């Protein structure tokens, strides 16, 4: 088997450009003024949303990265999941996808074929179609998707709508970057990274959440920071759920390339919190779960619905008046 991860400097969402530098870069762009552009760069979100009419809007996103696993099929499925999940994070449903691919010319064609086939399978599982794409030669392999989806204009989930009194939930445990970097048993991490957020979004939709984002390259603390800053609120995290092996990896001193960049971007108040929990919160996730903010009085019903579907859901904190992100000593 071709060791795909050995051809990269850093794979998965840990390869993301620094959030702090990205914010600085985007300051130079003049926001597009268009009545029907519901979500663009002012502020940026998980995907762009454009209103077609009173009942329809399109959700458009793209996401690609270098391999983080050696198995070509797993890489294709993970990359596809990560891109498709951006549409789910906006409250939408994927409709159409195009491949974005870059591979060394000397790679066997059957390796590329496995990546494409697995991605196609995942796109179909999301209810969409993979209809083509573009492939170039590159020394470092990269793969992902551009995805178009649909959403009702009144059903868009921004990351900027969290309100004091909301409860915060997470639909997947954390630690994919730590577990992969530790190079122990990665089966659980791969299973989580290939789990689409579509079913969780379907359960969530009737509850009309105030704010939603998916936890990816900026880690839980980075994405919570974005939600707090753009909503004008303070987020208090009481719990940081870990997947099997993640805290052990953190205790062993494992850190990914995204860790220092995420700490720079999203400082948190965390007196007394262990370094292992901080590492977990700053760990760059690939195809992570949904971070959900909704009125606290809906919490029990939401938890009951997730439990009935056999889906992971944990309440991890709350939204209060103020600013910034605080992490309590309750930990993971």
Image: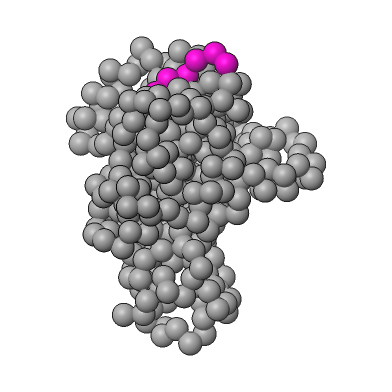
Residue range (magenta): 316-322
Residue 78 at x, y percent in the picture: 38, 58
Q: Residue at x 30, y 30 (%)?
A: 314
Compared to residue 248, the image places residue 241 above or below, namely above
| Of the pair 315 and 9, the residue shown nearer to us | 9
Task: Give coordinates of residue 187: x percent, y percent.
Answer: 24, 58
Per the picture, the main secondary structure of the magenta-coloured stretch is strand
Of residues 331 and 68, which is closer to you in this image? Answer: 331
Where's residue 160, x and y in %? 57, 28
Left/right placement of residue 206 relative to residue 225 reads: left
**What is the number of callouts on the image?**
0
Image quadrant occupied by the N terminus: bottom left
Question: Residue 225 occupies which quadrant of the picture?
Answer: top right
**Residue found at the very far bottom of the displayed protein:** 106
Give above or below for 325 relative to 289.
Answer: above
Quarter of the image that includes the C terminus = top left
Q: Quadrant of residue 120?
A: bottom left
Image coordinates of residue 127 in percent, x first then y, are: 38, 50
User: Would residue 319 be counted in the magenta stretch?
Assistant: yes
Residue 290 is a magenta residue: no
232 w.r.t. 291: above or below: above
Out of 247 and 17, give the one closest to the viewer: 247
Rendered residue at 28%/19% (across/down)? 301
At a point 46% along the width and 59% down the height, the residue shown is 12
Residue 48 showing in the rendered view? no
Q: Residue at x 32, y 52 (%)?
A: 252
Quadrant of the image occupied by residue 296: top left
Residue 54 visible at all: yes
* Colouring chosen for the image of the structure: one colour
């Amino acid at each position: 088997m071709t060791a795909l991860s050995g051809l990269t400097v850093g794979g998965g969402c840990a390869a993301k450009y620094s959030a702090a530098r990205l914010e600085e870069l985007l300051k130079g762009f003049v926001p597009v003024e268009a009545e029907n552009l519901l979500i663009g760069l002012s502020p940026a979100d998980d995907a762009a949303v454009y209103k077609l009419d009173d009942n329809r809007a399109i959700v458009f996103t793209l996401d690609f990265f270098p391999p983080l696993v050696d198995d070509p099929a797993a890489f294709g499925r993970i990359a596809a999941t990560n891109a498709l999940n951006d549409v789910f994070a906006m409250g939408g449903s994927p409709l159409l996808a195009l491949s974005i691919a870059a591979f060394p010319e000397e790679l066997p064609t059957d390796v590329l074929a496995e990546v494409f086939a697995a991605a196609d399978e995942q796109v179909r599982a999301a209810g969409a179609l993979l209809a083509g794409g573009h492939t170039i030669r590159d020394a470092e392999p990269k793969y992902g998707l551009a995805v178009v989806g649909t959403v009702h204009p009144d059903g868009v989930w921004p990351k900027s709508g969290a309100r004091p009194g909301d409860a915060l939930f997470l639909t997947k445990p954390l630690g994919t970057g730590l577990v992969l970097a530790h190079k122990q048993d990665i089966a659980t991490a791969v299973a989580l990274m290939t789990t689409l957020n579509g079913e969780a979004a379907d359960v969530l939709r009737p509850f009309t959440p105030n704010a939603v984002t998916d936890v990816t390259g900026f880690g839980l603390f980075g994405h919570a920071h974005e939600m707090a800053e753009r909503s004008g609120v303070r987020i208090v995290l009481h719990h940081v759920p870990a997947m099997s092996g993640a805290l052990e990896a953190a205790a062993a001193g494992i850190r990914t390339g995204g860790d220092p960049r995420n700490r720079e971007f999203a400082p948190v108040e965390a007196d007394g919190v262990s370094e292992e929990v901080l590492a977990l919160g700053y760990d760059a996730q690939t195809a992570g779960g949904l971070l959900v903010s909704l009125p606290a009085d809906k919490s029990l019903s939401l938890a009951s619905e997730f439990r009935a579907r056999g889906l992971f859901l944990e309440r991890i904190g709350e939204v209060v008046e103020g600013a910034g992100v605080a992490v309590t000593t309750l930990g993971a």
